[in-house]
Amino acid sequence: MTQFAVCSYSFHRALAAGEQDIFRYISDCKELGMAQLDPWNGHLVPISEESDRLKASDPDAPLSSESIAYLEQVKAAGDAVELSFGCVAVDGAHVYEPTAEARRANRGAAYRWIDAARRLGARQIRLDAGGPEELTDEIFDIIVEGYHDIVKRAADNGVEVVMENHWGSSHIPTNVVRILDAVDGLGLLFDSHNWAEGLREEGWQRCAKYARAAHIKTFEFDDDGNDPAGEIPRVIHLLADAGYDDVWGIESVPYDGDEYGAVKKTMALIERSLQG
């Protein structure tokens, strides 16, 4: 039986409109038949707000007792519907920044999010590389050093770190391969879409074998519920042929704004693709 998860960013418009929060996301995942919970840190509002404040005022500070109590409530909500936490996708704690001060602030944020992931019982945490598309040896070394530290910290807390082909340095396939090959224990959250212009095919071919988690990204569907570009079935087969057999993550961002409908259509499309 195919297992699915939906990154809560798929509901970012509902979140912004006040129609969903992390607790509604959890109950929605249960109703949709998801196998695990994959929250984007934008849904964990008190933690995000506190971490952002601390980045500016006290970057090395741990989570407050109020944040810990909130995480306990979130974990209990997942337990109540018998769903565990899979991958926590974190924005704002990437490794590379141009100054040591900014890197320290982000490292402190990464530590807090690793602690949050541990308290939720999450299997994975996505922390971005940062940096420009063209990596100098100096920037590359900073990213590798940072990931070595973060991966060890997370492993000591029972959490796997994954980078994502996302933005900056990490949507260039050569950079992704170079970083992954340099950092033992670092996995890849493989996004089907987030590659620099003209490099998507290269990204698929070179990086599918590194996938430890996946975001199948959809934007629109034809009348039969298929991807008009015809790309989703092929990338799913590439991942499966490369040995990917974990939960199929969904990150749908529908042009028509129907977030719940897009999740259901993406689930059906993945299922058909695997059977085809």
Image (tube, rainbow, N blue to C red):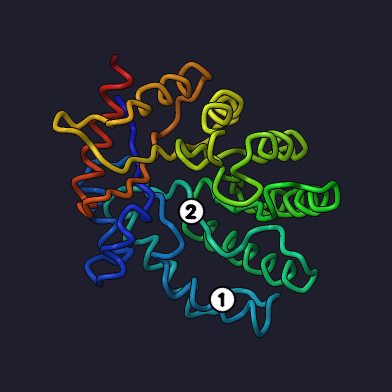
Q: Earlier in the sequence, mark 2 or mark 1?
A: 1
Which residue has dot 1 on it?
Answer: 52
Query: x, y percentage for residue 112?
Result: 60, 67
Can you tell which quarter of the image residue 266 is in? top left
* Numbered disc 2: secondary structure: strand
Q: Is residue 181 left or right of residue 93?
A: right
Badge 2 crowding class, 10 Å Cα cut-off, few under 14, some 14 to 19, many 20 or more, is many
Which residue has dot 2 on it?
Answer: 88
Query: Rounded to the nearest whole Å, what is the CA distance between mark 2 and mark 1?
Result: 17 Å
Q: Amino acid at mark 1?
A: Asp
Image quadrant in which the C terminus is located: top left
Q: Amino acid at mark 2?
A: Val
Query: x, y percentage for residue 180?
Result: 69, 37
Q: Is residue 74 left or right of residue 163?
A: left
Depth order, front residue of 192/41: 192
Residue at horizontal 66 percent and vertical 52 percent from the top: 129
Residue at horizontal 43 percent and vertical 65 percent from the top: 42
Query: x, y percentage for residue 225?
Result: 19, 32
Q: Is residue 45 left or right of residue 32?
A: right
Q: Residue furthest front?
A: 198
